Image (tube, rainbow, N blue to C red):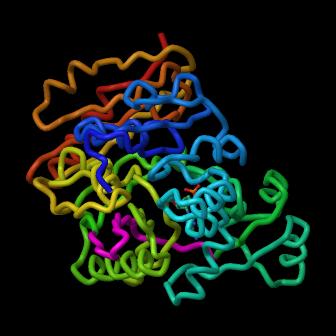
Amino acid sequence: MEFFSTTKTLGILGGGQLGKMLLYTTRKWDIKTKVLDPSESAPARLACDEFVMGSLTDFQTVYEFGKGLDVLTIEIEKVNVEALEKLEKEGVKVYPQPHVLKTIQNKCLQKKFYRNHNIPTASFDEFENLDQVKEGIIKGELSFPFVWKSAEMGYDGYGVSIIYSNKEIEGLNDGPCLIEELVPFEKELSVIVCRRPSGETVHYPVVESEFHPTANQVEYVLCPARLSEQATNKAIEIALQTAEAYGQIGLLAVELFLTHEGEVFINEVAPRPHNSGHFSIEASYTCQFEQHIRAVLDLPLGKTESKASAVMVNLVGKEGHTGPVVYKNIDQILAIEGVTPHIYGKKETRPFRKMGHITIIHHKIDTARKMAKQVKETLSVISK
Ligand code: ADP
């Protein structure tokens, strides 16, 4: 299927920063694109050929958007899967496939998928509502601490809570949920895998994520992760097993926990470009966005090795600042060798809103990590 400088069109559901970064590749290769996003000021708007404003979760909107496209992909997994199923039946190539999205959209289905495929994951139980959870505690079937996860509404840590006592249950949203064993992990790891329709598969190096202590949000991603060879191999093995089990086409970001005993468990996956792969824009021979485009258009996959070590710093809105955004001291960080900022183009900042990221590359990962701290302390995202 020839897309280069033709009228064949690639559709993308979602026009946020991930969509915008996917479009760097379609621009580079002169591939025609059409983007759907509910926001008038979606970051991807300026780089696509056609922009449609509309809901990603409404059947009719997604169906009308997708009709007549050659290939359709996503940058966010909360989209109307029924519309994608219909489009797939009518001949549109939909990657990731609707059946993959269906499993991933529901945390209970996703966890059961791992259990059924013998992919190591923290033990869990499913509940219909919070009353059932409370009953489980009274009967002694559940004991504190544990992790509560809403079956359907999670994103970036919302819909996930560590529960230490009855008191915290009161603040949770009611509805179907899963209760998971709390894993006292040593590190959170991620491996990005990419598969093509033929089954050709590549993976990026294992990365480690460091979280902000209070915001429950990734602050730094380090590539490569500082790990034993054994843990590295286990992480890669699980990630490849998972991508194959799903039959995923395109990127699959596999999030993992490494325990103090050296065990590796899968936490969850994202079937799209992922924050833990942003380092690849500067550090890898083929960045994750180009890799995803290659895979969904069924083109040969690119080399995933790194040219240098890298640390990615998420640039989020400073606490206490809401309104038109200012990137304070960005000129100072640009003066540091190996530092590249990415600004997503969101006009308004809010506390902890993802506004951009910065990649720091260096041949030594420990030096890159020290530089990342300096960058983080220098640059701040504030309102006017
Ligand atoms: P989301 O879909 O909102 O990103 P995750 O399932 O990734 O939700 O959980 C968010 C964070 O909560 C994880 O990155 C991890 O830090 C923590 N977490 C999730 N599950 C567990 C667990 N079983 N044990 C310990 N921490 C967990």
Q: Quadrant of residue 4?
A: top left
Q: Is residue 225 depicted above or below 369 in this figure?
A: below
Task: Please identify the dominant SS of the magenta region.
Answer: strand
Q: Quadrant of the N terminus?
A: bottom left
Q: Which of the pair 205/376 is nearer the observer?
A: 205
Relative vertical location of residue 320 with respect to residue 231 in this rendering, above or below: above
Ligand 1 location (quadrant): bottom right
Q: Position of residue 176 (x, y in %)?
A: 80, 65
Decide if residue 22 is on the left or right side of residue 367: right
Left or right of 360: which side holds 101? right
Q: Residue 193: within the magenta?
A: yes
Q: Is residue 138 magenta?
A: no
Q: Using residue 238 as the reference point, say whether residue 30 is left or right of it.
A: left
**Coordinates of residue 362 in the picture (x, y in percent):** 11, 47
Q: Quadrant of residue 231?
A: bottom left
Residue at x 29% of width, y 67% of height: 206
Residue drawn where x is 63% and y is 50% of the image: 79
> What span is colored magenta in the figure?
181-202
Q: Is residue 13 above or below residue 381?
A: below
Query: What is the residue that sits farthest to the top in this orientation?
Result: 384
User: Looking at the image, which is closer to me, 175 or 19?
Assistant: 19
In the rendered image, residue 142, in percent from the top left (x then y), is placed at 77, 79
Rendered residue at 63%/62% (across/down): 85
